[in-house]
Amino acid sequence: MIDREQVLHVARLSRLRLREDELEGMASELSTILEHIERIGELDLEGVEPTSHVVALENVLRPDEPAESLPRERALDQAPAAGEAGFAVPSPGAPVE
Amino acid sequence: MTQILDLTATRATELVAAGELDPGELFATYRERALGDDLGAYLWVAEDGSDAPAGGPLGGVPVAVKDLFCVEGVPSAAGSRILEGYRPPYTATAVERLRSAGAPVLGKTNMDEFAMGSSTENSGFGPTRNPWDCDRVPGGSSGGSAAAVAAGSAPWAIGTDTGGSIRQPAALCGIVGLKPTYGAISRWGMIAFASSLDQCGPLTRDVADAALLLRHMVGRDARDSTSVGLPEEVATPTAERLDGLRFGIPPELTGEGIEPGVSAVFDATCARIEELGGSLEEVHLPHSPHAIAAYYVLAPAEASANLARYDGIRFGMRRGEADLLSLYEETRAEGFGDEVKRRIMLGTYALSSGYYDAYYGQAQRVRTKIADDFRVAFEHVDFVITPTSPTVAFPLGERTADPLAMYLSDYCTVPMPLAGIPAISIPGGLADGLPVGFQIAGPAFSENRMLDAAHALELAIGFDAKPARA
């Protein structure tokens, strides 16, 4: 139902690098799960409103009041790599120091 | 020491208030128990109870907290290697409220990674074992919280429930577990799994403890715009009778697939309801057999978006520095466990172009029908009752190789969060020496009535069996 090529495509969309030995298992497990899930396709739900949220809420607003935000050093101190000014990442195509 | 450990949390708060119990001794006693935990229930134990002010209504009675609640400066990894060592710069609202009311954090409890699982075997830090039988699972995903309360290494605990993650482990460990109405408690600081379903709640020794813990967590929070609180203060449940109350039994969730031992306890508990003056009638939830399928589209879809933040940039693990794409892909490949990868894949697939309406759209429409089914049922009955779990605690390893079998563990608990309604699991009795949970679900915001009914039933059942490892 979902083949190796599709698994690779979805893995790329998910930013997951799957090992060769994971691909096979993933394809068969996802197929089994999807087979169960696809039974809902047999229900005639034409015209039924989809539910995205269960509590009736509309436009939850608050006054736009300035407040303290997380200090920069606190926001950065859990990062695997950070400089004084921000999070450090490899620039496209280049290794980080 | 044994006496302290035998107290319910409510009783401990009363003794502290009366000056007959020293909160420092109480904390130290539980800390020693938590440090001696050999079930894998704890991932971290606090030094002392100084994080909560003395004299609050919760009297210094410490609370064990599921690892996915952010606690400032305390390891909070949601059971995942990708967040190993992460110490958040802020504290979850639910935990902050408990602290303000006088309950210090006792420790962080083990869980299925990112709350994805029904056995706690998906933890990145090893499984938790069931105190009733160490070769069996405690349920999940709040398995550490449930095992700690059942084994007496915590007076009470909090967890989260997305598809059954409070109620199912409570059932499998012989304790009380309550999932409140969606929005009753702020989700701020809870590491997100599926945001339209996730809800925090108590795991406790009895119904009164669940009410007390709930009372001090509920309320609207400006930092979670979906939080609404409850319309009235959570009361101490006192009911001893069920006169005039109507309990609906849905054949869709009580028949096929339920183990005989579980059915026997369910039937015996139904008989108790009638002895207490309540009435039983059949109600139908025709779409609930499709709840698992809808849930395993919606929850993974939301998770695939929520877990995009684990990218090796701002916190947690980082691997693969060759270039940015490799960094993302290798960090996530190494940091996430198998079940988390499976759900991210499933969710990404369901949301991908060309499949969106067939999967996600259809699942959202099933969700509408499931909520409608409950609405119709509650026009005829006050509560809907089911077994909490189709089986008793299963052996470690039994379902790990078969994801779908694991998913079906949540057959009786998934419909309620899809409808956003509250439900409580209380111990109904034993089957083959293992606890069996009884679930009571009510309409949205019916927590007080539900707690009262659970209290009356709890008194009548008189469940006093103790696990081997308590």
Image: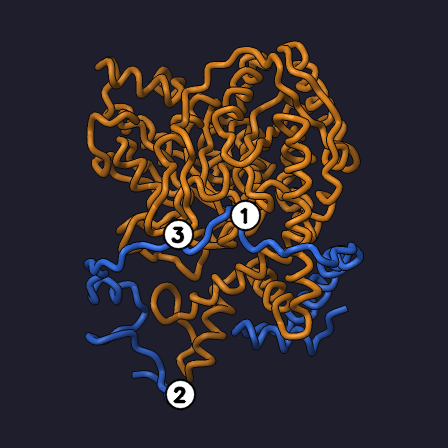
Taking the image as shown, residue B301 lies to the left or right of residue B431, namely left
Chain the render paints orange: B
Give the mark nearest the N terminus, 1 or 2.
Answer: 1
Residue B123 seen anywhere in this rendered image of the structure: no
Q: Marks 1 and 2, Cα distance to the nearest angstrom?
A: 42 Å
Spatial CA distance of label 3 from label 1 is 13 Å
Q: Amino acid at mark 1?
A: Val
Amino acid of disc 2: Pro
Decide: marks 2, 3 in contact (CB < 8 A)?
A: no
Residue B72 visible, this orientation? yes
Q: Are marks 1 and 2 on the same chain?
A: yes
Identify residue for label 3: B225
Numbered disc in front, either 1 or 2? 1
Question: Which residue corresponds to the image point at 58% horizontal and 39% vertical from the top-left?
Answer: B137
Name the residue tied to disc 2.
Answer: A92
Q: Nearer the viewer, mark 2 or mark 3?
A: 3
Residue type, label 3? Ser
- The one nearer the camera, B355 or B64, is B355
Residue visible at 28% across and 36% down in the picture: B99
Question: Which x, y percent locates residue B325?
Answer: 46, 80
Categorize mark 3 by other alpha carbons within 10 Å: few (<14), some (14-19), many (20+): some
Q: Are marks 3 and 1 on the same chain?
A: no
Chain identity for the colour blue used in the image: A
Q: Assign the N terminus of chain B to one quadrant of the image.
A: top left
Provide residue B31's location: percent of width, then percent of height: 32, 32
The residue tagged 1 is: A54
**Does residue B328 appear left or right of residue B396 in this picture?**
left
Tell me whether the residue at label 1 lies in contact with that at label 2, contact meaning CB atoms closer than 8 angstroms: no
Chain letter of the residue carrying label 2: A
- The answer for which chain carries disc 1 is A
